[in-house]
Image (cartoon, rainbow, N blue to C red):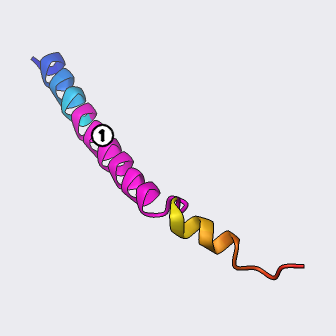
């Protein structure tokens, strides 16, 4: 009986750990998306705004 309980606790701990890792990865993905380099017409204009010479 103790072995079954220990296995059940191990499985539950694994599920909790996986959920935490998935949540952290999702948050990291959101931050990566929010801080991606700007692309498109605005990025092209910012490169041309320097002094010419």
**Is 40 positioned to the left or the right of 52 in the image?**
left
Q: Where is residue 29 in the image (x, y as percent from the top left)?
A: 40, 50
21 to 37, vertically: above or below: above
Q: Mark 1 points at which residue?
A: 17
Q: Where is residue 47 in the image (x, y as percent from the top left)?
A: 69, 70
9 to 53, vertically: above or below: above
Magenta includes 28? yes
Residue 46 versus residue 24: which sits nearer the camera?
A: 46
Q: Where is residue 9 in the image (x, y as percent from the top left)?
A: 19, 31
Quadrant of image for the C terminus? bottom right
Q: Identify the image quadrant of residue 8.
A: top left
Point out the residue furthest to the bottom here. 51
Quadrant of image for the N terminus? top left
Residue at image coords 55%, 60%? 37
Residue at image coords 69%, 79%? 49
14 to 22, vertically: above or below: above
Magenta includes 30? yes
Q: Where is residue 41 in the image (x, y as percent from the top left)?
A: 52, 65
State the extent of the magenta-drawn residues as a range: 14-39
Magenta span: helix, strand or loop, mainly? Answer: helix
Point out the residue furthest to the right here. 53
């Amino acid at each position: 009986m103790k072995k079954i309980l220990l296995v059940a606790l191990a499985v539950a701990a694994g599920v909790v750990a996986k959920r935490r890792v998935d949540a952290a990865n999702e948050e990291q993905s959101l931050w990566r998306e929010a801080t991606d380099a700007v692309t498109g017409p605005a990025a092209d204009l910012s490169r041309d705004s320097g002094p010419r010479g």
